[in-house]
Amino acid sequence: MNTKKSSKTSSPDVVLIGAGIMSATLGVLLKKLNPAITISVFERLDRVTAESSDPWNNAGTGHSAFCELNYTPQLADGSIETKKAIKIAESFEVSKEFWAYLVENGVIDSPDAFIHNIPHLSFVWGEENVDYLRKRYEALTSHHLFHGMEYTEDKDVIANWAPLVMNGRGADEKVAATRMELGTDVNFGALTKAMFEYLEKQDGVNLFLNYEVDDLTRKKDNSWLIEVKDRATRKESKVTAKFVFIGAGGGSLPLLEKSNIPEGKGFGGFPVSGQWLVCNKPEIIEKHQAKVYGKASVGSPPMSVPHLDTRVIDGKKALLFGPYAGFSTKFLKNGSYLDLPLSIKLNNIKPMLAAGLHNIPLTKYLIDQVRQSPQDRLQALKDYFPEAKLEDWDLETAGQRVQVIKKDKKAGGVLEFGTEMVTAGDGSLAALLGASPGASTAVSIMLDLIHRCFAEAKTPEWQREFKKIIPSFGKSLSKEKELAAKTRAWTTEVLHLSASHLEAEMTA
């Protein structure tokens, strides 16, 4: 990438902080909506996608709620709540529309560089969990976005879907699984890199790598003064912008606090680290072609939902299991151990303490995870792969996540497992906090941001562009069955996600 290395004062229309999937998505959208807009991107590391968007730092699951059981909780009356799952499924379809548009319009050369068809499976064992999965299947398949989902308690069928999961399992164990063949694996790093390569070719776009944002101050005219530092030379410079987006993953909270906007008061962050077991044996990797998700342990965060995961990273098939959760006071994988203590302010200490008191099981869970031995990790893997051997797997560090803590009138403070968009009242600044399913729903999140922060979003010109970029724009894929089917057929074809394309890939 031909990134800018000189530091100088400039006045772009937009500053994007963080060179991950969120900033890339927002940058491309804004440049398509208004080709004349000027954008500067500041990334504290020496390459794009080095944190949460890196393929080794996230699950790569195209989060469509096909297999993630934490999106469909069982209520006290035994019924299954599907609202969150439907919303996420719809958002992922919108993301696929945007990506298909990028492919068709030459922004991305080929979808094969970043997205692949990998079936999504949910797998459970035990009478109670089987009953839950059956109810979940019935609840979800009543909605058109989940048509095509299969359910079985037949061990032979599950063995055909995912042989590693069933080989060596007890004959008397009661099991069940669902499968959605339309599931995907997404290399968000490759996708983000492709979008930044496009952006760098556009007039008025500058990407500054190895530049850290030290401070940001609102000026009297409601524009922003951003203080940045070249981490290599230590040279400082200042940039002014009409609009600032803080999309720095775990690093967003400290920058939001520095902005001092009233809307950002009271937010805190709880960091959770992770590790993967990565298979090092090619013959095992080849036997598995699915993302198999199970149920999270009681008290564990959603990012710790265990999964035996086929990945395609830089054109090579991989097999991962995890993530194993841990605790670190860092907000970024390449952050500082002072991140958490320095984020505690007078305006958020009460919500953070309250959230801590209400999440004692989570604290105990994380302590137990940190104390795990290699044999403990192997036993967790054997729940999904009974014949697993420790020597066939290497332990690798995954990305750092910061879960959102926010004020709550009743509880004082609550821990949120999702993403939170915080915007200034005048629309001059926005910050994205939180984690999963963030990357998969980035397009919907950025469309919401644009409508909150850019008055032009309501103009006929931008409305027409929105409809070119997102064909279903202004309509609801979750409510309009025929539109959803038409849209899904188009994105499946353009993104090479059909079963026939999958067969061609596997025999190539």
Image (cartoon, rainbow, N blue to C red):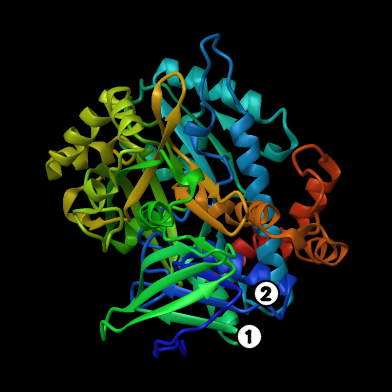
- Judge by depth and name the residue closer to the eye, 442 or 70: 442
Please determine whether, in this image, residue 263 is positioned above or below residue 394: above
- The CA distance from mark 1 to mark 2 is 8 Å
Name the residue furthest right: 460
Q: Mark 2 points at which residue?
A: 31
The tag on residue 125 is: none
- Judge by depth and name the residue closer to the eye, 17 or 106: 17
Q: Residues within 10 Å of mark 1 (few under 14, many from 20)?
A: some
Task: Give the amino acid at mark 2.
Answer: Lys
User: Residue at point 35% right, 40% down?
Assistant: 304
Task: Give the amino acid at mark 1.
Answer: Gln
- Residue 394: x and y in percent read 21, 57
User: Residue at point 80% right, 65% down?
Assistant: 462
Q: Name the residue under label 1.
A: 202
Q: Seen in the image, is 244 located left or right of residue 454?
A: left
Please determine whether, in this image, residue 183 is positioned above or below residue 354: below
- Residue 114: x and y in percent read 53, 68
- Judge by depth and name the residue closer to the eye, 131 or 145: 145
Please determine whether, in this image, residue 246 is positioned above or below residue 198: above
